[in-house]
């Protein structure tokens, strides 16, 4: 039984650790790309910006909840082994549950949103160049 619990603890910890590493990288990319969505907001294309906000919130919430549930499972395991093991395994299901409630934790690309954003950035740059005194 002890060997089984050690294997399950290792599985849960490693799975959540690497998922959080992946989410951290995605979050860095999302933050750096987020300023491009601001070019499309004045033109009325709010869908890309709203989706970007949902992704950021979903990533942060998922990471926080997974880490919290994993630590809670590790704290409970000395007194209640089965409850602690269940909590640690449940931590891996947080992204699926957040996705069911509309918080996107993936990096699916919206092609039309990317096209509108790129067009807005190019048009804004052209306008600034034309308006600048020569």
Image (tube, rainbow, N blue to C red):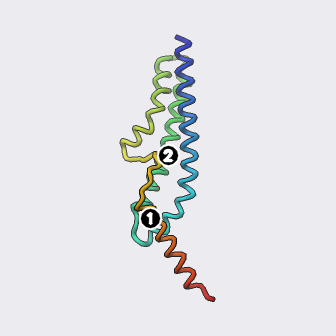
Q: Looking at the image, is 69 positioned above or below residue 119?
A: above
Q: Is residue 98 left or right of residue 34?
A: left
Badge 2 element: helix
Q: Residue 113 occupies which quadrant of the picture? A: bottom left
Badge 1 element: helix
Residue underneath mark 2? 59
- Residue occupying the far top of the picture: 1
Q: Which mark is residue 49?
A: none
Residues packed near mark 2 inside 10 Å, few (<14), some (14 to 19) or many (20 plus): many
Q: Nearer the viewer, mark 1 or mark 2?
A: 1
Q: Residue 66 location in percent, x, y?
A: 50, 36
* Residue at image location 47% in from the left, 70% down from the top: 119
Q: Looking at the image, is 34 positioned above or below residue 20?
A: below
- Quarter of the rendering occupied by the C terminus: bottom right
| Nearer to us in this view, 38 or 81 | 38
How many numbered circles does the render carry? 2
Residues packed near mark 1 inside 10 Å, few (<14), some (14 to 19) or many (20 plus): few
Q: Which mark is residue 115?
A: 1
Q: Are marks 1 and 2 in contact (CB under 8 Å)?
A: no
- Residue occupying the far bottom of the picture: 134
Q: Residue 41 location in percent, x, y?
A: 44, 68
* Residue at image location 39% in from the left, 61% down from the top: 47
* Residue at image location 61% in from the left, 88% down from the top: 133
Q: CA distance from mark 1 to mark 2?
A: 24 Å
Question: Which of disc 2 and disc 1 is earlier in sequence?
Answer: 2
Q: Residue 28 location in percent, x, y?
A: 58, 51
Q: Residue 65 location in percent, x, y?
A: 49, 38
């Amino acid at each position: 039984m002890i060997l089984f619990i050690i294997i399950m603890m290792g599985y849960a910890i490693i799975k959540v650790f690497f998922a959080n590493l992946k989410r951290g990288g995605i979050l860095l990319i999302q933050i750096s790309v987020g300023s491009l969505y601001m070019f499309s907001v004045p033109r009325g294309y709010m869908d890309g910006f709203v989706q970007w906000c949902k992704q950021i919130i979903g990533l942060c919430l998922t990471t926080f909840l997974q880490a919290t549930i994993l630590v809670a499972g590790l704290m409970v395991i000395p007194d209640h082994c089965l409850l602690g093991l269940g909590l640690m395994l449940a931590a891996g299901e947080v992204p699926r549950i957040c996705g069911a409630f509309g918080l996107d934790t993936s990096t699916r690309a919206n092609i039309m949103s990317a096209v509108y954003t790129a067009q807005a950035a190019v048009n804004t740059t052209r306008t600034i160049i034309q308006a600048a005194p020569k």
